[in-house]
Each structure stands twice: as C-alpha cells, then as structure tokens.
C-alpha cells in the first residue's frame, strides 16, 4: 500500500542525532562511519531498529538471526536504514526460575532501546510466550511506529501414525512413561523427535495464543501468526515487515493509534475462538495497561460466554498449528466470528481489520469450525464445556482466578472435595509419587506460594501432577488449584492465578489440608467451606513467608509487581503517560 508521507525528513527522531552541525552531530556520524558505513547510508532516511530476541538458548527463535537479514532487505528497499539490536531472549523451558519474571525486564529493555537510540521506527522480532507481550508492552510505552514479526510455529512430527508436537504431547507421554506404558528407549526416541525444527510450540499454547491476539489487534500482517517458522513464506513475511516499518514512519502510524479498547476486545474474541492459553488472561490486562485502556478479567469472561472455541488445535482439539495455517489461519477464523468483532479498527497495514480479512476463507471446516458447530458442544450438564476461559471468585479468590473449561473434564467443573495442600513446588514433587499419600480422585490438589511475589515470577506450576498411585488406577484428571500459572500447551481441570496470592496474605494462605473446597463453574464460584470465624482466627495467626531474594532484579520484581488480575506489570511502568525524549548534548 502506498500512502503519501505525512512526515518530512526534519521531523524524524533520528535527525536529532545525525543532522546537526554541532560537535554532537559530528560525533554521532563519526561513530557510525567507524563501522565502515558510508555517511549517505544512514543520513536523510528513516532509521529502523530491529529488536531481535534471537538466542542460541531459545530454540523457538533460533532462526530469527537469519530472518533479520530479510527484514533488513525490506527496510533498505523501502528507503530506510536498519540497525539490528539484540534484546533479552525469553526462551520458554530454558529460562529459570520462569520466563514470566523477565517479561517486564524485556518490556523495559524494548522501551529504552527505542527511546535512547536514534530510531524512527521498529520491527519487533519474537514469538515465544512472554516475548510477544513484552515487545508489545515496550513498544506501546515508547510509541514510535512499530510492527511485530512473529517467529512462527515449529513443524509437526509423527508418532505411531499420529501427528504430534510440543507441550501437550510431552505431558501426555510423560504420564504414559510414569506408569510404564512407554519404556526408556522409546522415551529417549521421542525426546529427539517431537520438536524437530526451530519455531514456537505448534499447539495453541501461549506462543500462538499471544501472536494471534496481536494479529487480531492489528499489530502485524493478516495471517502472519500461523506461517511456519521454516516455510519460505516466513522469510517473505520478514521482508514485508521491514518494508512496512519504513512506510509507517512516514505515515506516523504508531501503536497507540492501533491498540484501542475495541482492538483489544478483538484480540480477546480471537483468544476465545482459538481456545487459547490461560496465560493470556495475565498478558492482556498488562498490554491494555500500557495503552491506558481498562481491561478486566470480567471483560474476558463476558467475551468467553458468547464466543465458543472454534479452532480444533491442541490442547482443546486434536490438530496443530501447521494444520491451522493450511486451513486459512487467523483471518479465516476471524471471518467466522465477524459479528463479534469491531471491523473498523486500524491495523499496521493502514487498512481496517475488516479490509484485511475480507475474502480470507476457511479451507478446512474441521480445523476451523463454524460458530453453529463449535469444537466442544455445550451440554445440559455442562453448558460451559466449550468455553476457552472462565473467571471464578469466592472466599478463596476474591479478586479472581481463571480456568480453561475447554481443556478440562466437564464432571470436575462442579466439584466438592477435601483439599490436599502443598506449601511449595518442591514439597509437592517430593510427595506426589509416594504410594502412601492420602489422596483419591475426589481430592482437590492445592499449591500455594507459586504467585508473582511468592515464587517469585508466577511459574507454570499450576498443572499439578496427578499422584502416581492414581495414574496407575487410570485417573488422568483432578481438580487442582494454585496461585501459579499453567503452560498453555497443557490441559486439565486447573484453577489458576488465584488472587490475591498466598504470599501476600490472600485467602489461599489460610486453607488447610482436609478443608472442603467447592468449585461451581455455572455460578463462577470457588470457595473453601470454612466459617468466617475460623478464617479470622487463622488470619490472626498467619505470618508471611520469607522472600527468596534480598537484592537484584528479582527483589525489584517482588516489590513492584502487581497481582495476576492486574497483569503482573510493574506499578512504575503501567499507564500511558508520556516520557520525555532524551536530551542530546
């Protein structure tokens, strides 16, 4: 799309660094030429930063260094000049104690790279779970023209005639290995096969959930989310992002013009239709907060009640992201829920969402279902079965908790049972395989001290393992509750993100083993059946657990982080108040 420039050369940010005739301008130009650049390469044209989260310890992003070359080509061919800037890579699985603790770190780094350097626009390269929201949060806070280039999902694998991928199948086959249905040689073989190429998880885990939300919000090209990382089309996508970034600079098309409340609700609708990860319920309020838009858990719950799960992709379905790509990707899905969207929202293409998805039809109605025949049909016993998210409240979670009905067992969505409480992940893992553990299929497994402050960082501990003695009896799901998160690739009846968390004195801290706990998804209630008088006595006796860190970034995190229902952002980073441009002397 060609649009007449709205900005002139003198208005570009980079000119503050490069255009002046004083000693500072001389020094800036001099240092660029120190790298072998010709003065005319970077003078008199938009300068585009490529924020690249490539790392050799981030397999999801292992190809992004190569893709950055294509981004650079696009920038150069559009008349801009590229500079590639490495940023913290949040490779899920490898980063400990959890990538979530560093989401805000990357958001800060992105914002300050864009602010402190002579950049007119940016291409944001990422895709792994926390990378996407972090890059977008930082770009929103700086608010110069920016386009997101998703890393793309990995390729599928095959095992005994079945299509398999990451995360969901890892959990499934682990349970089979624990009970002896898979032997060690076969387990080792699976280890080497199931994730056989760079790219993000190929299920509808947090990675594809978040990139899809960002696409629905309008911050990347239509269809970008599902292009496989190893597809030649992904290189072409990277090129297009570079080219478009230059055009957006001249148009002065900034994230704040795109990320409105209407755009965010479009993202929420996509999230629900995809059966996306519960982690999005943390990231969406954080992104909205950076845009200065109010978005609550109740908003998410309201959309989930009217937009059923349509994407037949693991863990809610039985297909993978490569199948979703062939079926038409997100534009095809969005067309099926057009009546739930604001089609007039602006996107990075310069066109509206409605214009972007016009004519993008589905080619496989088994992969992307129609609203009249959703993936999981509601039943008289469980009308909530086909929902991607439910927000519950009660005396155990007054500020809310979430669960994913479409990946849960319907018979457990209305359940009362005795609690078995673990105070730490280590305690739980040490006990779970004990044959004498006092537990049966009616027990409610509870983990506390897994929240943003308590862990810290709210790790993905929420999919509590089924005790081995029950696995051996064929039990594959139980009601589980925690103030932690759960991998978007996992499944089960898991109530997550309990707020306030136990470490700051939330009611979860007062629960004891043997207390009866009641979940009623229809009433959106989660309660411990303990009298107010008893709870008051327990609170009077409660003392906060010691915090793990006394210094460093993790200590700052514990002091600044908000609770899960508010997005776990830092209080000092939230909001959209402008920050001054840096002084140049």
Image (cartoon, rainbow, N blue to C red):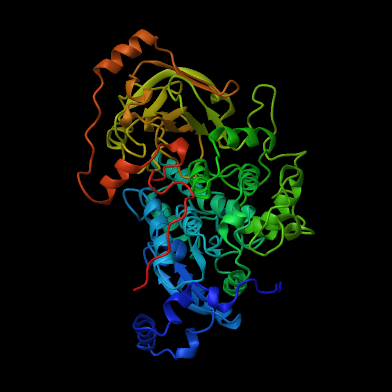
Q: Is residue 306 above or below residue 236?
A: above
Residue found at x 58% / y 64%: 228
Left or right position of 348 against 418: right
Q: How many marks?
A: 0
- Residue 414: name its quadrant: top right
In this view of the protein, which residue sits in the foreground, 338 or 529? 338
Quadrant of the drawing holding the N terminus = bottom right
Seen from this angle, which residue lies furthest left? 550
234 sits to left or right of 436: right
The picture places residue 487, in percent across and down from the top left corner, at: 46, 44
Point out residue 45 in the picture as x, y percentages from the top left corner. Answer: 54, 81
Q: Is residue 501 left or right of residue 223?
A: left
Quadrant of the snapshot with the C terminus? bottom left
Question: Do we see residue 327 in this rendering?
Answer: yes
Residue 558, image quadrant: top left
- The answer to whether 563 is drawn above or below residue 342 in the figure is above
Residue pictured at 43% horizontal, 37% vertical: 564
Percent x, y of residue 532: 39, 10
Q: Which residue of the protein is positioned furthest toward the front in this rendering?
A: 22
Q: Is residue 274 above or below residue 34?
A: above
User: For residue 325, what is the image quadrant?
Assistant: bottom right
Instruction: Using the image as rendered, state which of residue 119 and residue 35 is in the foreground.
Output: 119
- Write the residue at 58% across / 54% down: 214
Query: Is there any visible trace of residue 456 in the rendered image?
Result: no
Looking at the picture, tell me which residue is in the foreground, 121 or 408.
121
Look at the picture and state if 284 lies above or below 215.
above
Where does residue 270 sit, x and y in percent of width and height?
64, 47
């Amino acid at each position: 799309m060609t649009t007449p420039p709205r900005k002139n050369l003198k208005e570009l940010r980079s000119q503050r660094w490069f255009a002046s005739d004083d000693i500072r301008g001389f020094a800036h130009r001099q240092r660029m030429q120190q790298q072998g650049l010709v003065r005319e390469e970077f003078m008199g044209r938009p300068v585009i930063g490529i924020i690249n989260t490539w790392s050799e310890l981030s397999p999801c992003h292992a190809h992004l260094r190569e893709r950055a070359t294509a981004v650079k080509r696009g920038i150069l061919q559009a008349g801009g000049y590229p500079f590639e800037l490495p940023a913290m890579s949040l490779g899920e699985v490898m980063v400990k104690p959890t990538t979530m603790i560093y989401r805000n770190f990357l958001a800060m780094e992105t914002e300050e790279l864009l602010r402190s350097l002579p950049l007119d626009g940016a291409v944001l390269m990422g895709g792994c779970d926390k990378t996407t929201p972090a890059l977008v949060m930082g770009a929103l806070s700086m608010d110069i023209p920016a386009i997101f280039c998703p890393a793309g999902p990995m390729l599928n694998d095959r095992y005994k005639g079945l299509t398999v991928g990451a995360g969901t199948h890892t959990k499934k086959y682990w349970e089979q290995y624990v009970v002896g249905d898979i032997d060690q040689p076969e387990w080792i073989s699976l280890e080497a096969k199931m994730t056989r190429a760079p790219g993000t998880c190929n299920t509808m885990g947090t990675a594809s959930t978040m990139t899809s939300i960002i696409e629905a919000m309008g911050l990347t090209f239509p269809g970008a989310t599902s292009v496989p990382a190893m597809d030649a089309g992904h290189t072409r996508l990277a090129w297009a992002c570079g080219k478009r970034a230059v055009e957006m600079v001249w148009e002065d098309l900034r994230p704040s013009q795109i990320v409105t409340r209407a755009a965010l609700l479009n993202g929420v609708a996509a999230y629900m239709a995809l059966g996306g990860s519960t982690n999005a319920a943390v990231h969406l309020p954080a992104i909205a907060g950076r845009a200065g838009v109010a978005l609550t858990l109740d908003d998410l719950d309201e959309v989930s009640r009217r937009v059923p799960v349509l994407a037949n992709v693991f863990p809610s379905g039985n297909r993978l992201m490569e199948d979703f790509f062939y079926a038409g990707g997100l534009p095809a899905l969005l067309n099926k829920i057009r009546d739930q969207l604001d089609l007039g929202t602006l996107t990075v293409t310069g066109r509206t969402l409605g214009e972007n998805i016009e004519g993008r039809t589905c080619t496989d109605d088994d992969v992307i279902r129609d609203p009249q025949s959703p993936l999981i049909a509601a039943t008289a016993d469980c009308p909530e079965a086909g929902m991607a998210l439910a927000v519950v409240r009660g005396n155990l979670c007054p500020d809310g908790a979430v669960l994913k009905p479409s990946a849960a067992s319907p018979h457990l969505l209305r359940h009362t049972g005795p609690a078995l409480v673990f105070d730490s992940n280590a305690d739980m893992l040490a006990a779970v395989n004990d044959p004498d553990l006092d537990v049966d299929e009616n027990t409610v497994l509870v983990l506390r001290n897994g929240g943003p402050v308590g862990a810290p960082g709210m790790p993905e501990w929420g999919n509590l393992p089924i005790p081995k003695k029950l696995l051996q009896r064929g039990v594959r799901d139980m009601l589980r509750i925690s103030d932690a998160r759960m991998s978007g690739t996992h499944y089960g009846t898991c109530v997550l993100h309990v707020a306030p968390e136990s470490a700051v004195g939330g009611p979860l801290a007062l629960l004891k083993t043997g207390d009866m706990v009641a979940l009623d998804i229809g009433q959106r209630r989660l309660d411990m059946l303990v009298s107010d008088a008893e709870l008051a006595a327990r609170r009077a006796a409660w003392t906060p657990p010691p915090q793990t860190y006394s210094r460093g970034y993790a200590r700052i995190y514990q002091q600044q982080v908000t609770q899960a229902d508010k997005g776990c952002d830092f209080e000092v980073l939230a909001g959209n108040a402008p920050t001054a441009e840096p002084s140049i002397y």
